[in-house]
Image (cartoon, rainbow, N blue to C red):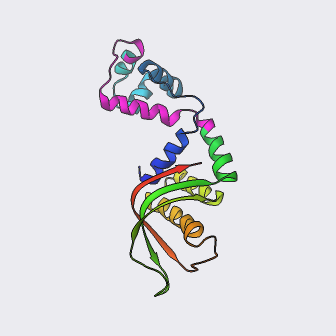
Amino acid sequence: MGEIDEALVRADEEGFTRPPPSTLLGRVNFLLRQLGSARAVAAELGVTADSVNRYRRGARRNPPPEVARRLEAAVRQRWQPRVRRRRRRQAAATRTGITIETRARFGYAAAPGTTDDDPRFRRLTVHLPPAYAQRLFDARDTGAPEGRMRQIVAEGLREVYFQDDGRRAAGLEVEFTGIDYLDASF
């Protein structure tokens, strides 16, 4: 998972209306309801079906750290899918757009003598319009590589921040590399 995908997952999780189960028993029972069988849960977690049943019965209370991380990730991935879809559709894709906060290295390509083309770190917080949010979500849903999602974010930052919605720097190309951190909210 790349930086942009992780930021979108964190932004999705900010919209939860209730916290996901925090106990081992609650998490295992939730996954059993979602996946239907101990065998399916075991395949998801990389353990045996007997281990899943021991967790459910309470015979085993402390899974190994790696299994505990996989269990938490599996629950968070499946928690409140309708809330996520509604929030993504209403807030990000059709109404408000998405806000990107980043510290990254930006390089420029423009006509000679018009701009400094040496890449340098900048800290930006930019609100991208709904069209870019929709493109970003579509790319993520189709399994696009991290490079494609970076390109979409770079196009949005170029249009909104560097070109000021077409009022300046026509023909400017922005390169978005060396991400120090990236956060998204919608």
- Report x, y in % for residue 180: 38, 57
Does 49 sit above or below residue 149? Answer: above
- Report x, y in % for residue 76: 48, 34
Choose between 176 and 76: the one closer to the eye.
176
The quarter of the displayed image where residue 24 is located: top left
Q: Main secondary structure of the magenta part?
A: helix
Q: Is residue 70 magenta?
A: yes
Left or right, 122 with respect to 66, comes to right
List the single residue furthest toward the bottom.
112
Q: Is residue 7 magenta?
A: no
Does 12 sit above or below residue 113? Answer: above
- Report x, y in % for residue 114: 49, 84
Does 186 sit above or below residue 106? Answer: above
Specify the segment rendered in magenta: 55-83
Choose between 84 and 98: the one closer to the eye.
98
The answer to whether residue 37 of the structure is visible from this angle is no
The quarter of the displayed image where residue 116 is located: bottom left
Q: Residue at x 57, y 52 (%)?
A: 137
Q: Residue at x 43, y 22 (%)?
A: 38
The answer to whether residue 134 of the structure is visible from this angle is yes
Total numbered labels placed on residues in the image: 0
Q: Residue at x 36, y 15 (%)?
A: 54
- Report x, y in % for residue 171: 55, 80
Does 167 sit above or below residue 130? Answer: below
Choose between 54 and 81: the one closer to the eye.
81
